[in-house]
Image (cartoon, helix red, strand yellow):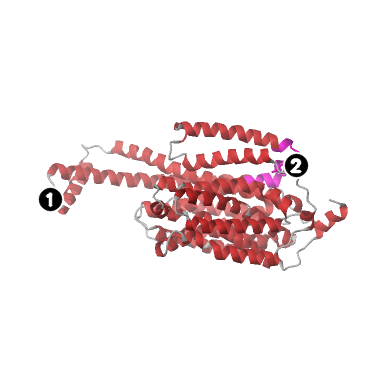
């Protein structure tokens, strides 16, 4: 780019009010993030409708996540090659049309194909929207801009299960996909009217398409996502296919790093990790993604599995987290311009850790709103982390680096979420067995208290049916074992909550690795 063009890029501001741009790109982001979580509650209905097992239906989620993950880091190259606005609109059209195909799918195979296409279309929506948003606002207002963007990224996963459960219960699981159509059309209309490319995009020369880079990226990310999604189900490294997939993924990951670091114009510029703020921010967003997505999965699962709530009711109970996030966004957007963001990020991690310890006080006698304030506060804490973390991570990068950085940043958040979900599910399954065995060893049949409890349960069985003594005794033992299993499962949930708190506390010293960004022309953010 010529010197005059570089100067123009630094001073460039969009001709449209940047808040209109924020709403336009937030619609696309909200639609994509909402769809990631909205389909989760509909899986049993999808399985029944297309004559598939529940395990087979989970590929509806996996196929989407794999395609989404592959496109995320490559979005910067496509934006430079075809124009960011044009590429964003194309992705929304692909996402919206494939949503219609998902809703109309007559079989599991067609649904999986449509979901893969939908994931590819949705992969670029978050990083491209974030890059447009950061460049459209002057440095002193980017904290507020990221607060608006965060409404889509933080609130959508919270509303998704509740909204998806309502649509599925009252209409059909197909409406979980059809709902994207009007949102997609509105997003395209607003982006056509309000969004424009900065000057450097028009003069960009991204080089030839990196086929080898994309191929290696697709293989190792695909292996990682499938392993995380299916690992607990197939006993992790006890399964031969997981060992081979891990080996293939590791080889392709190493080759990908070597290829991208030595290529003159790579598909993904990994040298950006030399920037200390960006590297620190990517590490923290990976850990935070694991914590927040783990919590988003864990709480509704607890209310459904142990408390017997429906998916819709469980979603309603945890939905106040969205209220906390919504309240936090405007406050934090203002605070990011007035104080050191490192203290905001640290406060967010601390708040989230405290809420996780609060959830660890759970028991089987709680009511639906026992953790109302903890849920609201966890939403507020997520806002405290997300907004200042995003702006500080991008704070020392030039506008030309934002697109590539945003793709990597969003990829690592999603990978962290997948890791977090996989870990919490594994801990639930493994620790339930451990706690069950530990408590079973403490139950001595000769213990008078155990005999008294069995006699009471046997009396209950005898009153409810005319079973014989042997049958009543066996039923009483089975009831006692079920009670033991419930307590063991409860303890495994408590372990999960405590581990999440430990992760968040561990992030506090890492926050101090950030350098405080200073206002300068062409920077992505100034604190």
Mark seen at residue 379: none
Tell whether 258 sits left or right of 422.
Answer: right
SS for callout 2: loop
Tell whether 454 sits left or right of 373.
Answer: left
Name the main secondary structure of what is drawn in magenta. Answer: helix
Residue at image point 47% right, 48% down: 109
Viewer-side residue, 396 vs 88: 88
Crowding at mark 1 (Cα within 10 Å: few <14, some 14-19, many 20+): few
Residue stretch in magenta: 260-282
From the top left corner, tell me how far across and down residue 184 is, in percent.
59, 62
Residue 291 visible here: no
Residue 469 visible here: yes
Location of the C terminus (image quadrant): bottom right
Q: Which residue is mark 2?
A: 265
Viewer-side residue, 84 vs 377: 84
Residue at image point 20% right, 45% down: 475
SS for callout 1: loop
């Amino acid at each position: 780019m010529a010197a005059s063009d570089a100067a123009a890029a630094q001073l460039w501001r969009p001709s449209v009010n940047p808040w209109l741009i924020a709403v336009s790109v937030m619609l696309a982001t909200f639609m994509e993030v909402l769809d990631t979580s909205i389909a989760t509650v509909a899986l049993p209905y999808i399985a029944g409708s297309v004559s598939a097992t529940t395990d087979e239906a989970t590929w509806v989620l996996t196929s989407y996540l794999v395609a989404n993950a592959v496109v995320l880091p490559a979005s910067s190259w496509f934006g430079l090659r075809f124009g960011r606005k044009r590429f964003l609109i194309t992705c929304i059209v692909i996402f919206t049309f494939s949503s219609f195909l998902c809703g109309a799918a007559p079989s599991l195979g067609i649904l999986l194909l449509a979901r893969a296409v939908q994931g590819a279309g949705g992969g670029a929506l978050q990083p491209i929207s974030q890059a447009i948003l950061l460049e459209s606002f002057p440095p002193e207002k980017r904290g507020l801009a990221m607060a608006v963007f965060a409404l889509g990224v933080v609130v959508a996963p919270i509303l998704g299960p509740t909204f998806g459960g309502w649509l599925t219960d009252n209409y059909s699981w197909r409406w979980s996909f059809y709902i994207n159509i009007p949102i997609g059309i509105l997003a395209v209309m607003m982006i056509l009217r309000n969004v424009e490319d900065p000057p450097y995009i028009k003069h960009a020369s991204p080089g030839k398409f990196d086929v080898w880079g994309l191929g290696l990226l697709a293989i190792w990310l695909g292996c990682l996502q499938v392993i995380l999604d299916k690992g607990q189900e197939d006993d992790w490294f006890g399964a031969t296919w997981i060992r081979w997939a891990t080996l293939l993924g590791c080889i392709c990951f190493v080759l990908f790093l070597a290829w991208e670091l030595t290529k003159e114009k790579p598909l993904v510029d990994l040298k950006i990790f030399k920037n200390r703020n960006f590297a620190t921010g990517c590490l923290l967003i990976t850990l935070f993604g694991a914590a927040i997505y783990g919590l988003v999965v864990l709480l509704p699962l607890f209310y459904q599995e142990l408390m017997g709530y429906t998916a819709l009711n469980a979603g309603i109970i945890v939905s106040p987290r969205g209220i906390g996030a919504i309240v936090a966004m405007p406050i934090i957007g203002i605070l990011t311009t007035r104080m050191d963001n490192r203290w905001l990020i640290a406060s967010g991690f601390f708040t989230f850790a405290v809420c996780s310890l609060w959830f660890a006080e759970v028991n089987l006698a709680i009511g639906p709103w026992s953790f109302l304030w903890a849920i609201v506060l966890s939403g507020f804490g997520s806002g405290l982390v997300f907004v200042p973390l995003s702006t500080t991570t991008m704070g020392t990068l030039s506008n030309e680096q934002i697109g590539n950085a945003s793709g990597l940043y969003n990829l690592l958040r999603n990978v962290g979420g997948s890791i977090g979900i996989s870990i919490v599910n594994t801990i639930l399954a493994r620790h339930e067995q451990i706690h069950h065995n530990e408590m079973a060893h403490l139950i001595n049949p000769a213990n008078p208290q155990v005999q008294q409890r069995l006699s009471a349960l046997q009396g209950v069985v005898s009153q409810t049916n005319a079973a014989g003594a042997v049958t009543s005794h066996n039923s009483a033992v089975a009831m006692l074992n079920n009670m033991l299993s419930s307590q063991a499962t409860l303890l495994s949930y408590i372990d999960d909550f405590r581990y999440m708190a430990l992760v968040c506390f561990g992030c506090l010293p890492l926050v101090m690795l950030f350098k405080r960004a200073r206002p300068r022309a062409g920077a992505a953010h100034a604190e």
